[in-house]
Image: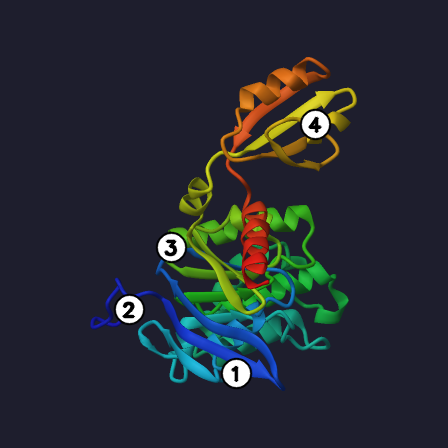
């Protein structure tokens, strides 16, 4: 890290950024601040503007208005060797041998080939690609190709990692491996930006998040603070019997059925003990827990409120 660099400055800062394509507004007046040395989630449904935002951060696209800074410098002049970018559309060569192209991409980032060859084996082993290192990329499964793309992103040891849908195509074991890697990178002081529409998965990995919808920011802040602000207004209920009556109980706003359990969203001021008593009188309750709402529920609530305000 350069001696003159202020570690208190955010790793990435967007101020009033907008981008349109042929009259379609992809990102509108977006301001974000990504803290250094943590995991930041850029979340939202498909088409929310996440990928466009990342491409502007990486200077692949220029914003129509606003400014973007990376590590205290304009995005148009970043220190490229300090940033690792994993795009949603993968950028490796299908017919090129895995090991050769990973070394090649590290060299493009300024890492001498001998040093890249030293760094590569631990990554291949950790992500389960060691046996495939001499195979062409198109001989690998989609999940393995995803892991190879990730190694290409981290092999030059960047300070900031920007990952667009990094868990796409991975099986549950692969997701767990990547989760452990993300935790390791955070402990090493790296800044990790994860962009995804899979809110539930990324919520567990990130310290802070921004939720965007139709190019606009809906929420931003620490995950714990966002959830605590919305209070413990959700009941997780497992039971035996017919629970069709639950949605009609006083104090119940919404019931989401997940098969083995339901989540009950309470109205403001509702008494969870009253709901428990009513439920226990008609079904056998095996689990009852009052929890903070998920980011998914908070997002839906905020988007719905914004839509009603605009109507």
Say few, some or many: other residues with alpha carbon within 10 Å of mark 1 (under 14 / 14 to 19 / 20 or more).
some
**Residue at x 77% of width, y 28% of height:** 244
**Helix, strand or loop for disc 1:** loop
- Check whether the beta carbons of the residues at disc 2 and disc 3 lie within 8 A of each other: no
User: Which residue matches tag 4?
Assistant: 246
Q: Nearer the viewer, mark 1 or mark 2?
A: 1
The numbered disc on residue 188 is 3
Q: Which residue is mark 1?
A: 61
User: Which secondary structure, mark 2?
Assistant: loop
Q: Quadrant of the N terminus?
A: bottom left
- Distance between mark 4 and mark 1 Cα atoms: 50 Å
**Residue picked out by circle 2:** 1
Quadrant hosting residue 156: bottom left
Frontmost residue, 254 versus 165: 254
Which residue is at the far left? 4
Image: 10 above or below 237: below
Q: Quadrant of the C terminus?
A: bottom right
Q: Earlier in the sequence, mark 4 or mark 2?
A: 2
Q: Which of the 4 image quarters holds residue 130?
A: bottom right
Between marks 1 and 3, how big is the CA–CA gap? Answer: 30 Å
Reading the chain from its start, which is encountered first: label 1 or label 3?
Answer: 1
Can residue 295 be spotted in the picture? yes
Residue 191 is left or right of residue 297, and the answer is: left
Hey, which quadrant is residue 40 in on the image?
A: bottom left
Above or below — where is 308 with respect to 228?
below
């Amino acid at each position: 890290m350069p001696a003159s660099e202020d570690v208190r400055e955010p790793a990435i800062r967007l101020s009033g950024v907008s981008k349109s394509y042929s009259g379609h507004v992809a990102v509108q007046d977006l301001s974000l601040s990504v803290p250094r040395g943590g995991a930041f989630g850029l979340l939202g449904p498909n088409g929310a503007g996440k990928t466009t935002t990342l491409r502007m951060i990486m200077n692949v696209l220029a914003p129509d208005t606003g400014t973007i800074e990376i590590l205290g410098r304009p995005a148009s002049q970043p220190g490229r060797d300090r940033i690792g970018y994993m795009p949603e559309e993968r950028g490796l060569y299908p017919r090129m041998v895995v090991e050769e192209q990973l070394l090649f991409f590290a060299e493009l980032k300024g890492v001498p080939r001998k040093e890249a060859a030293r760094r590569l084996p631990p990554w291949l082993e950790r992500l389960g690609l060691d046996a495939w290192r001499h195979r062409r990329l198109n001989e690998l499964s989609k999940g393995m190709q995803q892991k190879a793309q990730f190694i290409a992103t981290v092999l030059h040891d960047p300070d900031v990692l920007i990952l667009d849908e990094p868990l796409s195509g991975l099986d549950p074991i692969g997701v767990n491996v990547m989760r452990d890697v993300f935790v390791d990178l955070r402990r090493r002081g790296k800044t990790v930006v994860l962009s995804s529409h899979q809110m539930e998965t990324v919520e567990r990995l990130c310290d802070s998040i921004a939720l965007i919808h139709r190019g606009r920011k809906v929420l931003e802040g620490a995950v714990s603070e966002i959830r605590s602000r919305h209070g413990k207004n959700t009941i997780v209920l497992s039971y035996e019997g017919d629970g069709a009556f639950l949605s009609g109980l006083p104090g119940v706003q919404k019931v989401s059925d997940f098969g083995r359990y339901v989540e009950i969203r309470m109205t403001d001021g509702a008494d969870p003990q009253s709901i428990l008593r009513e439920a226990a009188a008609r079904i056998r309750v095996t689990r009852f827990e009052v929890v903070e709402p998920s980011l998914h529920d908070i997002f839906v609530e905020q988007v719905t409120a914004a839509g009603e305000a605009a109507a």
